[in-house]
Amino acid sequence: MIVLKSRAEIEKMRVAGRIVAGALAGMRELVRPGVTTAELDRYAEDYIRKQGGKPAFKGYMGYPATICASVNEVVVHGIPSGRVLNEGDIIGIDLGAVAEGYYGDAAVTFAVGQVSQEIKRLMAVTEECLARAVAQAVVGNRVSDISHAVQSHAEANGFSVVREFVGHGIGRKLHDDPQVPNFGPPGQGPRLKAGMTLAIEPMINLGVYQTVVLKDGWTAVTLDRKASAHYEHTIAVTEDGPDILTAL
Ligand code: MF3
Ligand code: CO
């Protein structure tokens, strides 16, 4: 069931969303060669708690950390560790916070120092996919108009779209209805209404679209071990158009 939120509830989600955005802004300053993903995780957890929120992922289905730190061929759900970031890596940082019972969820992919032209293009196109998807989140459209916006832009640029992980409704729960795939024909699925709140999160691969989950039960990597990028915003569908609640 898709839960519609009142304007007051959307403002509560914006509180959580601002905490998420602030933590990601801090990540942008910290990501550089030599930093470990565990250090990034510690910063994010401290920041979220200081702002009066709680990490949304820690403890969720047993997930052990505040952020997902997904380096290079890792698509999503990389677990923070002593791994040191090196020049030329990319890292997708996904984080969620809950405040006053409402969730925010967002992700950004950062370059570590200089990265190749091909990787720069992967990151730019994935961020454009998110922008185009958000632009489809308007009253009267259907969920798959969002999906189609992502797939058409990614594939027109020669990249592939992850199928095994999708975006989602969000609100009083981290994951709620509806599912928001990043692929599919337009004009299908539930019709978008004012008060729907969605986490839209394109995951785009340089090579093949298939993924595999490693033995830790979380880390999802590309089947061909080529790079993957991930960007995510929590948005509200409103009569005035899409409202990005995790705006940086
Ligand atoms: N943003 C991801 C998602 O929406 C993060 C989930 S990680 C988990 O699915 F640890 F919370 F599962
Ligand atoms: Co999400």
Image: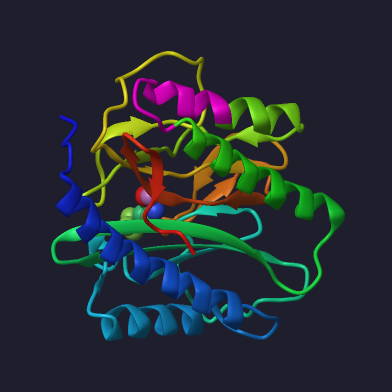
Q: Is residue 81 magenta?
A: no
Q: Is residue 15 left or right of residue 219?
A: left
Residue 142 vs 108, above or below: the answer is above
Residue at the farthest right position: 117
| Residue 150 coordinates in the image, percent (x, y) | 57, 32
Residue 104 drawn above or below residue 82? above
- Name the residue: 61% across, 84% down: 35
Residue 217 visible in the shown view? no
Closer to us: 225 or 235: 235
On screen, residue 58 above or below 118:
below
The colour scheme is rainbow
| x, y percent for residue 139 | 34, 26
The quarter in which the N terminus is drawn is top left
**Viewer-proximal residue among 142 and 46:** 142
Viewer-closest of 239 and 10: 239
Q: Position of residue 59 (x, y in %)?
A: 23, 66
Residue most extreme to the front: 240
Count of labels shown?
Answer: 0
The residue depicted at 25 percent of the width and 52 percent of the height is: 174
Q: Is residue 192 left or right of residue 171?
A: right
Location of residue 147 with respect to 112 vertically, above or below = above
Residue 51 falls left or right of residue 114: left
| Residue 185 visible in rendering | yes
Q: Nearer the viewer, residue 32 or 37?
A: 32
Residue 178 horizontal side relative to residue 156, left or right:
left
Q: Which residues are magenta?
A: 137-149
Please name the residue shown 71% across and 67% down the image: 89
Q: Residue at x 56, y 42 (%)?
A: 131
